[in-house]
């Protein structure tokens, strides 16, 4: 019995689809490999090779570890028995990971918004969104904490350190 089957048996839930488990477990290693390939593609020939020994060494070590993770996961998946179909497994996982998925979506939107609307507006939207996704519903508390964080960031980074974050169309 694999660790996944033992966990599902302990919680008395039906076993998820093998293909869904493969998708969940292999998504991060695959993303790491893609990012490593993109890094090598964007740096090779553009930056002196003397400056790339360490990053390429780290990528090589992570590549070996990723191959080990793939081998281990695939070995466990070969003996996996499933009770649910792929769609039901994904639906159950989305419900289980709803808050984490929400934080990820907020982070992606926040990063995307920084350039077009400016750092401080994007940060205000991001802070409010993180608090709502995290379960906070009190608008007064959300407003006060967002304002305090923005003032702190402005004082520390703009006034004290002299950094200039991206400004949007309003100049903020």
Image (cartoon, rainbow, N blue to C red):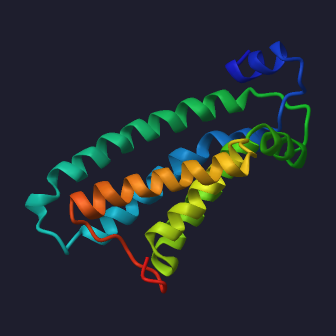
Judge from the rendering whether residue 92 lies leftward or rightward of residue 45; answer left or right.
right
Give the camera-side residue of 35 and 121: 121
Location of residue 156 in the rendering, given as x and y in whole percent from the top left corner: 30, 54
Placement of 104 over or under 2, stated as above or below: below
Judge from the rendering whether residue 145 lies leftward or rightward of residue 59; answer left or right.
right
Residue at position x 64%, y 58% in the image: 105
Farthest bottom residue in view: 169
Give the camera-side residue of 91 and 136: 136
Location of residue 53 in the rendering, given as x and y in whole percent from the top left corner: 15, 53
Location of residue 79 in the rendering, given as x and y in whole percent from the top left corner: 74, 26
Give the camera-side residue of 92 and 65: 92
Q: Quadrant of residue 81?
A: top right
Residue at position x 17%, y 49% in the image: 54
Judge from the rendering whether residue 100 lies leftward or rightward of residue 111; answer left or right.
right
Farthest left residue in view: 50
Quarter of the C terminus within the rendering: bottom left
Q: Quadrant of residue 151?
A: bottom left
Residue at position x 53%, y 34% in the image: 71
Residue at position x 69%, y 32% in the image: 77
Location of residue 18 in the rendering, given as x and y in whole percent from the top left corner: 78, 38
């Amino acid at each position: 019995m694999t660790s996944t089957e033992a966990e599902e048996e302990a919680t008395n839930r039906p076993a998820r689809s093998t293909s869904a488990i493969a998708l969940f477990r292999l998504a991060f290693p695959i993303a790491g490999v893609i990012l490593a390939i993109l890094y090598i593609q964007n740096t090779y020939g553009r930056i002196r090779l003397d400056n790339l020994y360490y990053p390429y060494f780290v990528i090589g070590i992570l590549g070996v570890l990723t191959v080990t993770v793939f081998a281990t996961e695939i070995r466990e998946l070969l003996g996996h028995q499933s009770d649910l179909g792929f769609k039901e497994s994904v639906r159950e996982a989305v419900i289980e990971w709803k808050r984490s998925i929400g934080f990820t979506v907020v982070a992606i939107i926040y990063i995307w918004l920084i350039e077009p609307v400016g750092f401080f507006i994007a940060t205000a939207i991001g802070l409010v969104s993180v608090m709502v996704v995290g379960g906070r519903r009190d608008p007064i508390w959300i407003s006060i904490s967002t304002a305090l964080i923005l003032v702190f960031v402005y004082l520390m980074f703009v006034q004290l350190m002299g950094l200039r974050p991206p400004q949007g169309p309003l100049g903020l």
